[in-house]
Image (tube, grey):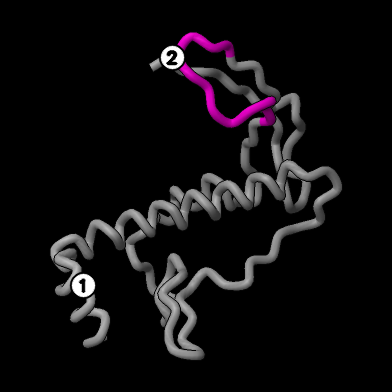
Amino acid sequence: MEAINETLEVKNVSERVQDFINATGIHLVRSLKEAMEKARRTNGLAGIQLLDIRDFPGQGHATVGILDVFWDSKQIVKPEEFRQFNEQTILLMRAKKRTYFQGEILSADLEVSHFGEPTYHLSDIVMGIDGR
């Protein structure tokens, strides 16, 4: 840690460490969300296995997870936010592209990805769009 702190001081960025940590956490969650949703849009997928979602304490120390080495939250993402894309049942969107600009028309299919016992019929699902 001392060597890292010295480097930060030399580069005059030590006061921005928390900004870097926050940005890294946001990128991590977005990357996990994209990877998991992409996998769940794959036809015939039987499930998803993540290598780990916590920091890796071996071979030095890699602070790469949304949880610390003790499985405690690092406050990167709230559990209810994480479950929006990693829950037994989630809503997915399939579109021709991922980025749209003002004035473009969005045409997309909505899909339900469900891993678990069937508990409802698709006819029971109601969806809508809020224009806010």
Residue type at numbered disc 2? Gly
Name the residue furthest bottom. Answer: 59
| Chief SS of the magenta region | loop
Residue 99 in the image: above or below residue 82: above
Residue at numbered disc 1: 8
Q: Residue at x 46, y 69 (%)?
A: 65
Q: How many marks?
A: 2
For label 2, the residue is: 131
Q: Residue 29, percent across and down?
A: 47, 54
Judge from the rendering whether residue 80 lies leftward or rightward of residue 87; answer left or right: left
Relative depth, front residue between 126 and 67? 67
Q: Residue at x 67, y 45 (%)?
A: 38
**Mark 1 closeness class: few <14, some 14–19, many ≥20 residues within 10 Å:** some
Specify the quadrant of the image occupied by residue 102: top left
Task: Please report contact status of discs 1 and 2: CB closer than 8 Å, yes or no.
Answer: no
Q: In the image, residue 112 lies at what x, y percent?
A: 70, 36
Of the pair 106 and 116, the residue shown nearer to us: 106
Stretch of the chain drawn in magenta: 94-105
Task: Classify mark 2: residues with Cα within 10 Å, few (<14), some (14-19) or many (20+).
Answer: few
Q: Disc 1 on helix, strand or loop?
A: helix
Q: Where is the C terminus found, in terms of image quarters?
A: top left
